[in-house]
Image (tube, grey):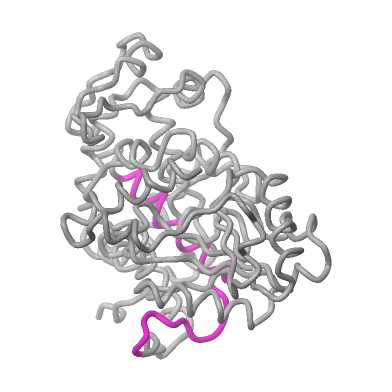
Amino acid sequence: AVANVQQTLAETAKFSKGKLQLANLQGKVETTPDITHVGDCQLIVECVAEDLETKIAWLEAAHQQNPNAILATNTSTIPLELIAAGLSESARTKLVGIHGFHPMGIMSAVEIVRMDSTSDEAVAAAAQYVQSLGKTAIIVKSTAGFLINRVLTPLLAQALKLIEQGVSPLEIDAAMKMMGWPMGPIELMDFIGLSTCKAVVNSVAARGMGDRVQAVADDSVLARLVEMGAQGIYKKDRAGRSTGELSDQFLQVTAGKMAVAGDMDRHAMKEKLELAFALEAVRALEDHVLWQGDYRFDGDGVLPKAENQRKHQAQIIDAALYLGLNAPGGAFRFLDGLIDDKYGSVAQLVARCDQLAETDSAFAVPKTLRQMAVGNERFLQPIPV
């Protein structure tokens, strides 16, 4: 565990590009194998393995040592209700999620995850802690994938489908970079970690996503790479950065038979990736994944409320996706631009999605978007005249 902490600190310092010094980070961390040392803490954050029973056992042990402390879980996939069900009754109202994004030292967004039973005191303590770190707190409900992973997962699922169809990861990443993203979905999966990506996809698929996201099949390329212990789909240099060359393990699993997609195929891939991402953001908005109320973004105030709640929540989701994923323009500003620049109207976008949905439910049109087609509305921009 101590070695993992030291590795995380080293990675944080590396990705900060000189803004954070490793020695300073190490000086702020104290380690101990004795759980009784949490007795004086006001907030206890677990970051153990992404396993339900392990998290329950650790949180309950911490609660017994310090019954007054707020309990925070760093889970990225497990609904808080499942964790709370294994805790003593006195611990349940104190349970809150604090979910950051890799690399934590660089990415600004942190999801504060709450259940109906989570106390306002626990949420406030978690948000205050996150803001003290200079991060942006996004308060979300305990649902499948929370907010950011939920919106990201259909995009990753599309990329995995393309790999299974024999499309080169190089082509898939090139298609996504045409959207303005700093890295493609395969590079992103390597960066997050293949085993973590598999766990996230499986968890989201198991909790109310219908056919839009399916669990990773045991004989799939991703599952076989994880089973082999592969470090990535791309080769890494000594500093752990992608070389842009496909890894030996990936070539072994796929037998080197990746197809080379042409330019038109790349544009088709781009359309599927961008629509899977944007449509899921619309569904997250429909499902009110954001907790109702004001959403504090920094120590100086809150994001001003827009003239309508839909626009307000769309702005917050866009900010969260940018700060947590580096998604340029978020989802709704990007979708407004797609409507204007590519499809011409919401009705034309809906028609295209209906066409794609005939073979893939990831493109099923959300109710909100179909309603917006009547008046050719936009999420953030004024209605064109």
Q: Hey, which quadrant is residue 137 in on the image?
A: bottom left
Residue 314 visible to an observer of this rendering: no
Instruction: Please indicate whether residue 341 sits to the left or right of residue 153 in the image.
Output: left
What residue is rendered at 26% in x and 37% in y? 173
Residue 342 visible to an observer of this rendering: yes
Image vertical order of residue 238 relative to residue 116, above or below: above
Image vertical order of residue 142 relative to residue 178, above or below: below
For this rendering, which residue is in front, 204 or 358?
Answer: 204
Residue 367 picture location, percent across and down: 54, 64
Q: Hey, which quadrant is residue 44 in on the image?
A: bottom right
Q: Residue furthest right?
A: 89
Residue 67 painted magenta = no
What residue is rendered at 16% in x and 57% in y? 18
Residue 246 picture location, percent across and down: 26, 22
Image vertical order of residue 300 relative to residue 248, above or below: below
For this rendering, which residue is in front, 194 or 355?
Answer: 194
> Which contiguous range is marked in magenta?
271-300
Q: Hey, which quadrant is residue 252 in on the image?
A: top left
Residue 28 picture location, percent across and down: 37, 63
What residue is rendered at 47% in x and 78% in y? 310
Quadrant of the drawing holding the C terminus: bottom left
For this rendering, which residue is in front, 361 or 255?
Answer: 255
